[in-house]
Image (cartoon, helix red, strand yellow):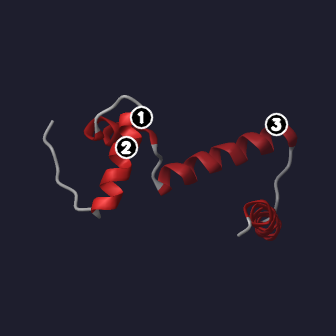
Amino acid sequence: MSDANVRIPEEAKDRLAAIAAGEGLSLRAYLARLAETLLTPQERAERAEQARAALEEWSGYAPTAAEERDLDGELDRRLAQVTGG
């Protein structure tokens, strides 16, 4: 496997290195593991669609686009309330 160089602020590198060390990993190993476990936006959208389809199949619940927007707004409001955002 070939390596790549990524330019980030020194503070970010130091923080990531400290997190990696806390988990007993080198920065290289930590970043490789991170890249393997995080989902891309497309992967997240695919999983969300799979979850929506499973919910509809299981319960018959199929919200309209407007209902989804309202529910997303309510979730955002509640999250902001508990996070102080």
Image quarter for residue 24?
Answer: top left
Tell me residue 13's x, y (percent).
30, 54
Residue tagged by mark 3?
Answer: 58
Which residue sits at x=33%, y=44%?
Answer: 17
- Label 2 crowding class (10 Å Cα cut-off): few <14, some 14-19, many 20+? some
Q: Amino acid at mark 2?
A: Ala
- Marks 3 and 2 sit apart, C-alpha to C-alpha, by 44 Å
Horizontal relation, residue 63 to residue 84: left or right: right
Residue 34 visible to an observer of this rendering: no
Which residue sits at x=46%, y=45%?
Answer: 38
Tell me residue 29's x, y (percent).
29, 35
Which residue sits at x=32%, y=52%?
Answer: 14
Q: Could you say which is closer to the camera, residue 80 or residue 55?
A: 80
- Label 3 crowding class (10 Å Cα cut-off): few <14, some 14-19, many 20+? few
Tag 1–tag 2 contact (CB < 8 Å):
yes
Residue tagged by mark 1?
Answer: 22
Tell me residue 16's x, y (percent).
36, 48
- Marks 3 and 1 sit apart, C-alpha to C-alpha, by 42 Å
Q: Amino acid at mark 1?
A: Gly
Q: Amino acid at mark 3?
A: Trp
Work out whether 58 lies above or below 63: above
Where residue 18 is drawn, which disc sits there?
2
Q: Secondary structure at mark 2?
A: helix
Horizontal relation, residue 48 to residue 66: left or right: left
Residue 39 visible to an observer of this rendering: yes
Tell me residue 12's x, y (percent).
35, 58
